[in-house]
Amino acid sequence: MPTLRYFAAAAEAAGTDHEEVDGVDVQAVLTSVRRAHGPRLAHVLEHSSLLLDGQYVRDPSTELSESSVLDVLPPFAGG
């Protein structure tokens, strides 16, 4: 099952820093966690960057494997 890793505000909104989520592509996984964690995480996801196995991903139809790791990186303050 793909693993989501949450950082900063995403971890706070999800109530965890990681979880395994069933899904065949990025969109399916994000839809699942939006339903599971509600509007607060949904809002954070709208403003977050996603890294799939260390590579920036923008296309929600990008397929995931059982061993995929999807990082949710909200905007960070500072620099």
Image (cartoon, rainbow, N blue to C red):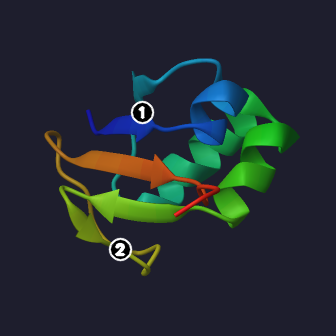
- The residue that appears at 57% across and 37% down in the rendered structure is 8
Q: Which residue is mark 2?
A: 57
Placement of 50 over or under 10, stated as above or below: below
Query: Residue visible at 54% across and 19% down?
Result: 16
Mark 2 or 1: the one toward you: 2
Residue under label 1:
21
Q: CA distance from mark 2 to mark 1?
A: 17 Å
Residue located farthest toward the front when viewing the structure as drawn? 79
Residue lying at the far top of the rendered structure: 15
**Which residue shows up at 19% across the image and 59% down it?**
54
Secondary structure of the residue carrying tag 2 is loop
Residue 70 drawn at (x, y percent): 34, 49
Q: Identify which amino acid the numbered label 1 is placed on.
A: Val
The answer to whether the residue labelled 2 contacts the one labelled 1, judged by CB atoms less than 8 Å apart, is no
Q: Nearer the viewer, residue 61 or 70?
A: 70
Under mark 2, the amino acid is Val
The secondary element bearing badge 1 is classed as loop
Residue 33 in picture, x, y percent from top left: 61, 38
From the top left corner, tell me how far across and down residue 40 is, in percent: 83, 40
Give the residue at x 42% y 33%. 21
Quadrant housing the N terminus: top left
